[in-house]
Image: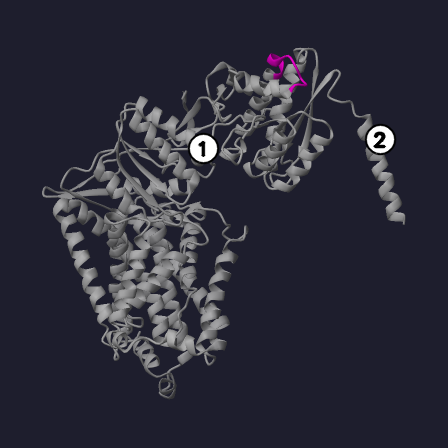
Amino acid sequence: MKTRFAFFVVLIAALVLAACQPGAAGGTIKISVLAPMSGQVATFGDSTAKGVQLAAEEWNAKGGIDGKTIEVVVKDSQCSADPAVNAMNQVVGEGGKFVIGEVCSSASIPVSEIAEANKIIQISPTSTNTTVTLNADGSTKQFVFRACFIDPFQGKVMAKFAAEQGHTTAFIMFDQGNDYVRGLAENFEKAFVEAGGTILGKETYTKNDTDFSAILTKVADSKAEVLYLPDYYNIVNLVGAQAKEKGVTAVMMGGDGWDSADLDVTAAEGGFFSNHYSPEDTRPIVQSWVAAYQKKYDGKTPDALATLGYDAANLLFAAIDQADTSEDTAKIAETLAAIEYEAVSGKITFDAQHNPVKSAVVLAVKDGKVSFSASVAP
Amino acid sequence: MNSTHTFLSTPPFIESLIKKKILGKLMLILLAAVVVWRMGTALVENPSLFLQQVINGLQLGFVYALIALGYTMVYGIVRLINFAHGDVFMVGAFMSFYAISRLQLHTWPSKLFPNMNSMLSVGIGSITVVILSMIVCALMAITIERVAYKPLRSAARISALITAIGVSFFLEYFGALPFVFSANYITYKRPFEVTTWVANGEGVQTLARGIEVPANSVIFSNIAVLIIVASIILMVLLQYTVTRTKIGKAMRAVAYDKQTAQLMGINVNMIISITFAIGAALAGAAGMLYAIAFPQVVFWMGIIPGLKSFVAAVLGGIGSIPGALVGALIMGQAETLSAAYISTPMRDAIAFSILIIVLLVRPTGIFGEATREKA
């Protein structure tokens, strides 16, 4: 009996509190951030939330959106489906209309279903899985967007970069069993051939392979100018170390799988890889963002997650501003789909599947360190 | 019951085929024909590329040989397939990694004698590291034998086999603990710089970084030379120990008949320990050579090379020392040439098919005779 009584007290208290909350109407626009604030990838959530908060502060300092103040609420969705669905149901219960999140695709996908059903605008800053913005039948979810480019896009960007560098021949190495790697490789091939290049060879391997000498001998023999290897850093380290020994002179190129503190810069020396963003990017918008972030958060340099969180929030605010409504989410979604916005991670427009079309950065591994090389527009 | 029985029974015609091993022989002939044809066309098309791939295969084959010797020696003496052997190899690689990256052990000669020739000092330093890895692995193998295998020596062979698998898992996942080796991929620092040479009709020259390989020439690196030379030296030493020393004689005696050997005053337990130690020392050396060639260490790195070397030992005839070498060289070539001329993802399938076909014809392996020489 006692526990039941306690339960009722809590329930009533919760109801009273919920009733007291100011709704979306009036002077505020409530933005819910769904991100992992605890667990293994808590740093992802922390960065994302900081990015969104900074964007909201900047808009509020300019007088908010059409006179309304932005209020950011962070909910811990732990980068996994169940807690994310619970958090999203809370948002629905509170009458929320705008969600930035989740960080991880596995959590963003179930959240996007709820968002679509309740006409809530969702922008995932970093989920790359294609089904986040797509319905089961392949049609685009009306209310769901993302701020990052999807994986295969990097292959396209790198092919363009390779062609711009004057390379005309390439050799592709990829792990057949990894969707991410294969996607990048296929798109690189397509775009490189379209740009007038020739693919001299394609070789596959499996993820536990360590001996790449047979493949690399073929690469050296083909005299290709570019070796495209869009795998993770551990494979890059192995291939890079063996490539020099086998007389491979091709420039190694890859994707954001290379982006790790454990990348062997000696093995990858002379290589290039694509990424979402670099704090060394010379564009003024990047430099002012880095400065603002460092000023607010004790000199910390913003990472890709913070940047994409910031971009996602700014996209949303700009769309609400341009649509002149904070209630009619269908109109805001329409505005967002047609928006052209100069974000930190590049000038963003959305394609038919609500994936951003924007530039990527190319980083160079040179003299034992990774540094910004170029910003490549699609 | 009855229907199952008839389903399982093979027609007499097929049974006679199996008895005469015709199926296996046919497949072997077919395989040989395909190999000769494929390799022949490859050789005609681009002889230098073919030779290059053969060198790649040799490098891999010699590493496998060092590991395979450990399997074959232990099997020859105690009839145990020591599945933990691949993990001893992994520990050897990690020991040399710590000696080089953490302790800078390979630089001691240049620190002690600053005027020494740099090549000589690196050589002595690397030999020190390899000896350290070999000693650590040998001690570990003796401990494993005493703790896990010795109490089971008179038990059913399957018990010892399962224990060996258990030891293998223990070494892997103990190594994966964050305070042991950790579960990360770790970049291995080679104790020396890689030099590549070009060999062609005009002689041998150093290939400068960033220069394309000239046509009609073969390149080889100091790593390939090191692996092949070090493996041959170790194998000659082993062959000498087994055939020319008192310990070797005792090992052979124990392999033939444990009880009689004991009656002749041979300390069987000690000989078994020594056999484990020698096998593990070779695996430790192989671990370092492998990590130099493919510079990355991770806790599960021993599984695949261990399995391949086991296959090599069986292919050559388990229990036979020359068999281990020949089997390993065949495995190395099969893998590299399949990757080069057939398909990279298929290379393991092809290498293992060779094993199956050879065993169909010769169930004891290439060198596996009834009167085989046992280590």
At mark 1, the secondary structure is: helix
Rendered view: A307 above or below B27: above
Residue at 32% from the left image edge and 48% from the top image edge: B122
Tell which of B223 and A297 is nearer to you: A297
**Which residue, given by chain and number where applicable, does mark 2 sit on?**
A16
- For residue A22, which numbered disc appears in the image? none
Q: Chain of mark 1?
A: A
Residue B351 rendering spot, x and y as whole percentages: 29, 58
Which callout, 1 or 2, points at the residue further toward the start of the chain?
A: 2
Q: Chain of mark 2?
A: A
Would you say residue B195 is visible in this rendering?
A: no
Tell which of B210 and B358 is nearer to you: B358
Residue at 25% from the left image edge and 56% from the top image edge: B334
Is residue A332 rendered to the left or right of residue B82? right
Residue most toward the front? B3
Tell which of A192 and B273 is nearer to you: A192
Residue most toward the left? B201
Q: Which amino acid type is shown beneath numbered disc 1?
A: Asp
Is residue A107 rendered to the left or right of residue B237? right
Tell which of B102 and B179 is nearer to you: B179
Label 2 CA crowd tier, 10 Å (few <14, some 14–19, many 20+): few
Q: Quadrant of the C terminus of chain A?
A: top left
Residue A294 rendering spot, x and y as whole percentages: 59, 22
Residue B118 rendering spot, x and y as whole percentages: 29, 44
Q: Which amino acid type is shown beneath numbered disc 2?
A: Val
Rendered view: B114 above or below B226: above
Which one is closest to the eye, mark 1 or mark 2?
A: 2
Magenta region includes residue A128: no
- Over which residues does the magenta segment extend? A320-328
**Which residue, given by chain and number where applicable, does mark 1 sit on?**
A151
Would you say residue B171 is visible in this rendering?
A: yes
Is residue A289 rendered to the left or right of residue B336? right
